[in-house]
Amino acid sequence: MTDLSIALYQPDIPGNTGTILRLAACLGLTVDIIEPAGFDLSDRNLKRAGMDYIAATTLTRHVNWERFEEWRKASGRRLVLASTRAAEPYTRFQFRTGDVLLFGRESAGVPDHVHERADARIIIPMVEGQRSLNVAMSAAMIAGEALRQISAP
């Protein structure tokens, strides 16, 4: 188990959240969900996407952004936001053990006050004219790069 964490800010789509929970279980990551979610966390779509992997995932629910921030600051962890408004490509960013990788709502990303609180903002470069990738795909790409860097000898 690594100290790397994926945090989801008010996720909208249960299938994406389930897929991220499955990813986290397989890679040894923890998941933080910042509520309110746009669905009931007992949703059958969440369970179908996460399958039996959800039981193997360390999941922490935070009732709101403020409580999440209290936890994060108390634990001394750096917040790395994936954002289409960022300038630094995720492949050039230097990840560290203990980073919290934050992903916004599928429908709206994160509000400005959350964007401003991030210690770092990274982007997945895409071809001109494309808006964004699926949040579960983005989480997999960024978590994979972070793990590669952290695990490198």
Image (spheres, grey):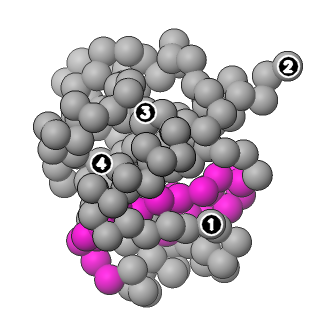
Amino acid, disc 4: Gly
Q: Which mark is residue 104?
A: 4
Read off the residue under disc 2: 153
- The numbered mark, 1 or 3, whose residue comes first in the sequence reads 1
Determine whether the residue tagged by mark 1 lies in a helix, strand or loop.
Answer: strand
- The numbered mark, 3 or 2, whose residue comes first in the sequence reads 3
- For the residues labelled 1 and 3, the Cα–Cα distance comes to 19 Å
- The numbered mark, 2 or 4, whose residue comes first in the sequence reads 4
Image vertical order of residue 117 relative to residue 22, above or below:
above
Neighbour tally class for label 3: few under 14, some 14-19, many 20 plus, Cα within 10 Å: many
Image vertical order of residue 106 relative to residue 132, above or below:
below
Q: Which mark is residue 58?
A: 1
Q: Nearer the viewer, mark 4 or mark 1?
A: 1
Determine whether the residue tagged by mark 2 lies in a helix, strand or loop.
Answer: loop
Q: Which mark is residue 80?
A: 3
The answer to which quarter of the image holds residue 66 is bottom left
Amino acid, disc 2: Pro
